[in-house]
Amino acid sequence: MTNRQMASDETRAGAGREAREAAAERASIAVRPEFRPGGSGRRERVFQLKGVEVLYSGVSAVKDISMDIHRNDVTALIGPSGCGKSTLLRCFNRMNDLIPGAEVRGDLLYHGEDLYGPAVDPVQVRKLIGMVFQKPNPFPKSIYDNVAFGPRILGRKENLDQTVEGALKGAALWDEVKDRLDSNAYGLSGGQQQRLCIARCIAVQPDTILMDEPCSALDPISTGKIEDLMIELKEEFSIVIVTHNMQQAARVSDRTAFLMVELDADEQNRWGRLVEYDETERIFTNPRDKRTEDYVSGKVG
Amino acid sequence: MTGAGEVQSERTRLAVAGARATVAVALRNQPRRDVILHALFAGLLLLAILLALAGLAALLIQALVRGAPALGPDLFTNVPSTINPEQAGFRPAIIGSLELIAGVILFVVPIGVGAAIYLEEYADKTRWWNRVIEVNIQNLAAVPSIIYGILGLAFIVRGPLDLGFILAAGSLTLALLVLPVVIIAGREAIRAVPDSIRQGSLALGATRWQTIRHQVLPAAIPGVATGVILAVSRALGEAAPLLLVGAVVFITFDPTPFSADGYSALPVQIFQYATRPQEAFQELAFAGVIVMLVVLLAMNSFAIWLRNRYERRW
C-alpha cells in the first residue's frame, strides 16, 4: 500500500461517513461501508471512483459516478442500453483512450493511484487490468499462440509452455484443447473462443479482469460455463462485468451497480448515471431506489 | 342467431374471394412496357460485356496467329538482331525486365507498406495534412505513366540523384509509378483487419507497434501481396516511362543493374521490333506480346489465387 492510499483510506474512514450517510438519505447512491460476513480479504479497494464523468467530443456519456470496487469481488454493472455501462468499464483499463475525442474527468483511483495521472502509461495499465470483450475475438493464430501472445510481448518467455497450460486450465479449456494446441483458434466454438480469450487474459497475470457482456453472443450452456469460471476466477482476480442479463448479475456477482439513462430538461442530451450500488442480494431483493426495483423486477427497461 | 351466423359466413366468403382475385391480378399483370424495357436493358448490358471481351479476344487471337511462327526456345535464349530476324530473340529484354521488377519490389514493398501503415494506423484524419496526403495518393495513382518518365529523367537520371541512364534508374521510376497502387492496396488490406483484433491485443498490454507487428500485419499480408503482384504486373508492361529513362538502347548482352552500357525491357523490345517493316520482325513482336501476356496472366492469376486462398471472413 502506498502512503497516498493509506491517507485516502483514513480520509474515507473518518470524514467519508457523514457524506455516505447523507448519500444514503438521498437514497440515490448507496455506498455501504460494511461488507458481507466472512469476506475477510474484501475490504481492499481496487478502484475508487469519485465524480467520474466520461465525455465523447465534449458530450457526456456517463456523469457523476462514485463507487468503490473491491478486491476478489465480482462486481456487476447493469442497466438499460445506452446507460454507459460499457463506457464506464472501458475507463478502468483506459480503453477509452483509443477513441478519438474521449475524455475522462473526475477521480479514478486504482489501488490508490490516479489511473489518469500524467505519469501513467495506458499500456502498463492494460497489463494489470485485462479485458474480455462482448464478441469473442481470438487472434487468427493457433490456440497456443493466442495464449502465448501476452507473455511473449511482455518478454516473459521462460516456461511459456507451463504458462499457457496454466492459463488454459484456469479458463477451464485445457481438457478440450490440449490435443490441438497448434490448430487455429477460429475452429473453436463460440463459447470455447470466449474461454480462450479469458485464458489469453489471465496468461498475462493481471490483477483485475474486465468483462464486457462476455456471454451475450453465447448459448446458455457456454454461458453457464463462463459463469462458473467467473466464480472460480474471483479467488485470484477482481472481476468487473457488464451484463444485460439480470439473472447473470444475480448469479455471479457480489456487488451490483445499477445505471440508468438520464435526460436533461429539454430532452436534448442523455447520459448514464449511477442509481444504486450495493450488495447484489440487496439490489435484487430489497433495493433502496424505486427505479432499481422497477428495473430488476422487469417493469421497465 | 343462425341467420346472423350465415350472413357473417357469407360476408367472409365474399371477402376472401375478393382478396384472392385482387392478389391474382396483382401477381400476374406485369405491364408490357416494363417487360420490354427490362429485355432492352439486359440486352444493352450484355452487348457492353461482349464488346469488351471481343476486343480482348481479337488481341489474343491476332497475337497468337501472327506470333506463332516465331515462338520457340530461341525467343528466350537469343539476343536481338537487326539483320537476322530468324536468329533474333528477347534474352536481354527478358533479363532486363526481371531485374527491373526485382528492383521495383525491393523499393515498393517497404515504402508502400510503411506508408499504408502510417495512413491507417497512425495518421490523425482530423488533421488537414493527412487528408491532403490521402487525396494526393489517390490522384497519383491516376497520373499518366509518361509523366513519371519525365519525373524519372529529371530527378533520378539527372538532377538530384544523377544516376545516369542505368537500369536501377528505370527500376526507381517504375517503382514511383506503382507506389500509389501498393499504398492503396496495403491500406485496404490493413483496414480489413477488424478492430476487435487490435483491441484484443491492446487490452493485453501490447503497445501500438506490437499490435501492428504481430497482429495487424500478419493478417494483412495476403492483401498486401495481392496489391504488390498487381502493381508489379503493371510495372512489367510499362514502356513509356522507360523510353525516357534510358531503355532505348539496342543491346545484345545481358544488362546489369548499375552498368552505364544501357539496358532493355520486354515491352520496349517489342516496340522496337514492331517499328521495323519486315514481316519477320513483326512476327517477333507478336511473339514477344504472347510471352508478356502469358507472364502477366500468370502473375494476375497468382494474385487472385492468393487472395482467395487467404481471404478471411471475420
Image (tube, rainbow, N blue to C red):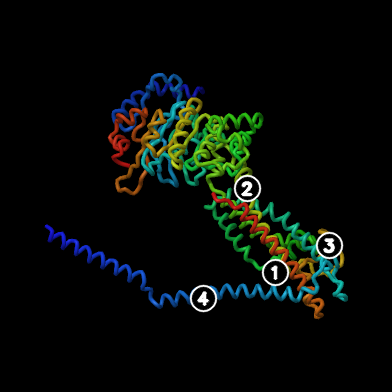
> Label 3 is placed on what type of residue?
Pro
Q: Whole-Å distance between the Cαs marked 1 and 3? A: 23 Å
Q: Which amino acid does the dot numbered 1 rest on?
A: Ile
x then y, percent, for residue B147: 68, 68
Query: Would residue A30 appear left or right of A159 to someone viewing this image?
Result: left
Looking at the rendered structure, whether the residues under marks 4 and 1 are on a common chain is answered as: yes
Q: Residue at x 59, y 61 (%)?
A: B138
Give the residue number, with chain letter if any, for mark 3. Answer: B255
The span from disc 4 to disc 1 (Cα, nearest Å) is: 38 Å
Give the Cα separation between the discs numbered 1 and 2. Answer: 33 Å
Q: Which numbered disc flags the more N-terminal residue, 4 or 1?
A: 4
Vertical placement of A227 versus B126: above or below? above
Between tags 2 and 4, which lies in front?
A: 4
Q: Which mark is residue B217?
A: 2
> Mark 1 highlights which residue?
B146
Residues at discs 3 and 2 in contact (Cβ within 8 Å) = no
Rendering coords of residue A53 (x, y %): 41, 38
Same subunit: marks 1 and 2: yes
Q: Quadrant of residue B197?
A: top right
